[in-house]
Amino acid sequence: MTGGGAPAARFAPDRATYVQSHVTLAVLAMPAAMILLWLTGTPHVWTGALAAVAARGWYLMSEELGHVWEMTGDALHGPAQRHVALADLSKVRRIGSAVQLITRTGDKHLIKFQPEPAAVVARIEAARPRAETV
């Protein structure tokens, strides 16, 4: 199949994974944010940190959940007209709920908020062309 064909796979962000990622971010980042707010003399440090994480999550949700990647026979096509040829990939790895794509030229892309990122990595790895051995 060529790059112009129907998608062989579609990697859409998952709303529950998005929310869980923000809960994890809140648990990990809020103590640091609270200390920073406390050091700057901000009253009610917990409310400021909680509000910041919640506002960020709410504000970005519709945009982030619209970032869909599709894999055709020879490439991955993502948001903002991103195009990554499978043959150009040097590394595909899981980072939390995301899958990081690294090209041979060093470009990096994220397929974010995947409920099963290991399965996405396996699917992409299986589709990558392999160098022939002599």
Image (cartoon, helix red, strand yellow):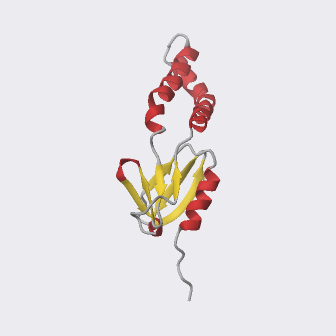
Which image quarter is the C terminus in?
A: bottom right
Instruction: Identify which residue, 105 or 75, lies in the foreground.
Output: 75
Q: Residue at x 61, y 50 (%)?
A: 117
Question: Nearest the camera: 120 or 72?
Answer: 72
Image coordinates for residue 113, horizontal then vertical, percent: 55, 42
Quadrant of the rendered image containing residue 77: bottom left
Q: Is residue 11 above or below residue 4?
A: above
> Number of marks in the image?
0
Q: Residue at x 59, y 58 (%)?
A: 121
Measured as percent of width and height from the top left, residue 65 is found at 49, 38
The residue most toward the left is 81
Q: Quadrant of residue 59?
A: top left
Relative height, residue 75 to residue 58 (above, below): below
Residue at 53% in and 50% down: 11
The residue positioned farthest toward the bottom in the image shown: 134
Going by the picture, which residue comes out furthest to the front? 6
Q: Position of residue 52 (x, y in %)?
A: 50, 23
Depicted 74 relative to depicted 120: above or below: below
Give the residue at x 55% y 60%. 92
Query: Where residue 26 sits in the image (x, y, percent)?
Result: 59, 28
Left or right position of 67 against 127? left
